[in-house]
Image (cartoon, grey):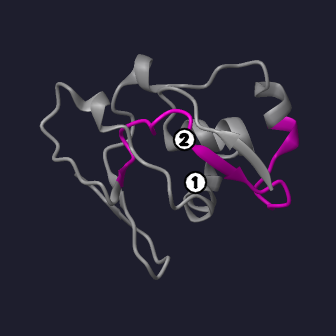
């Protein structure tokens, strides 16, 4: 298991692309990192309510959080990771709200996506 840190303005899709080379790794990242917190300060001009136990997929994560990446996962794509190695992947500044939804944490690890 790799132990990394989240970057500034990185969304869940950014993390999946940068560290797995695969957007299908979103659920695995969330399962392996239940401690990740959304950066609600990025919502300065938004009227979405602050929800500490909900990951808002439209917003980046708080920077410098510990991030666990499973290199043994079937979703881990070394070829794509190497191609993106020198790229800074942080889409929030440029794209704003890229996914209209939230990810509700559930203690049973049965996740639901809620569309806003």
Is residue 65 a member of the stretch shown in magenta?
Answer: yes
Q: Is residue 115 left or right of residue 34?
A: left
- Precedes in sequence: disc 1 or disc 2: 2
Placement of 28 over or under 98, stated as above or below? below
Give the quarter of the figure containing the N terminus. Answer: bottom right
List the single residue furthest toward the left: 47
User: Residue at 49% across / 51% down in the picture?
Assistant: 36
Q: Residue at x 51, y 26 (%)?
A: 8
Pick the front one: 102 or 2: 2
Number of residues whose C-alpha sits closer than 10 Å to that of mark 1, classed few (under 14), some (14–19) or many (20 or more): some
Dividing the picture into quadrants, the one containing residue 83 is: top right
Residue sitting at x 63%, y 44%: 16
**Residue 79 vs residue 35, the one in the foreground:** 35
- Where in the figure is residue 106, as x and y percent of width and height? 40, 74
Label 2: few (<14), some (14–19) or many (≥20) C-alpha neighbours in 10 Å: many
SS state under label 1: helix
Magenta-colored segment: predominant secondary structure: loop
Q: Which mark is residue 105?
A: none
- The answer to whether the residue labelled 1 contacts the one labelled 2, judged by CB atoms less than 8 Å apart, is yes
- Any magenta on residue 93? no
Give the residues drawn in magenta, as a range: 55-80
Q: Is residue 31 above or below residue 41?
A: below
Q: Residue at x 37, y 37 (%)?
A: 39
Q: CA distance from mark 1 to mark 2?
A: 7 Å
Secondary structure found at label 2? helix
Residue 13: give its label. Answer: 2
Q: Which residue was labeled with disc 1?
A: 26
What x and y, as percent, mark residue 14? 57, 35
Q: Is residue 18 above or below residue 91?
A: below
């Amino acid at each position: 298991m790799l132990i990394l840190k989240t970057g500034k303005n990185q969304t869940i899709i950014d993390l999946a692309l940068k560290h797995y080379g695969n957007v299908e790794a979103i659920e695995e990242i969330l399962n392996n990192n239940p401690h990740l917190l959304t950066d609600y300060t990025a919502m300065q001009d938004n009227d979405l309510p602050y929800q500490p136990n909900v990951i808002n997929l439209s917003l980046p994560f708080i920077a410098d959080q510990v991030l666990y990446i499973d290199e043994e996962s079937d979703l881990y794509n070394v070829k794509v990771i190497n191609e993106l190695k020198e790229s800074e992947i942080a889409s929030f500044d440029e794209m704003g709200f890229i996914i209209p939804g939230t990810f509700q944490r559930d203690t049973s690890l049965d996740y639901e996506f809620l569309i806003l």
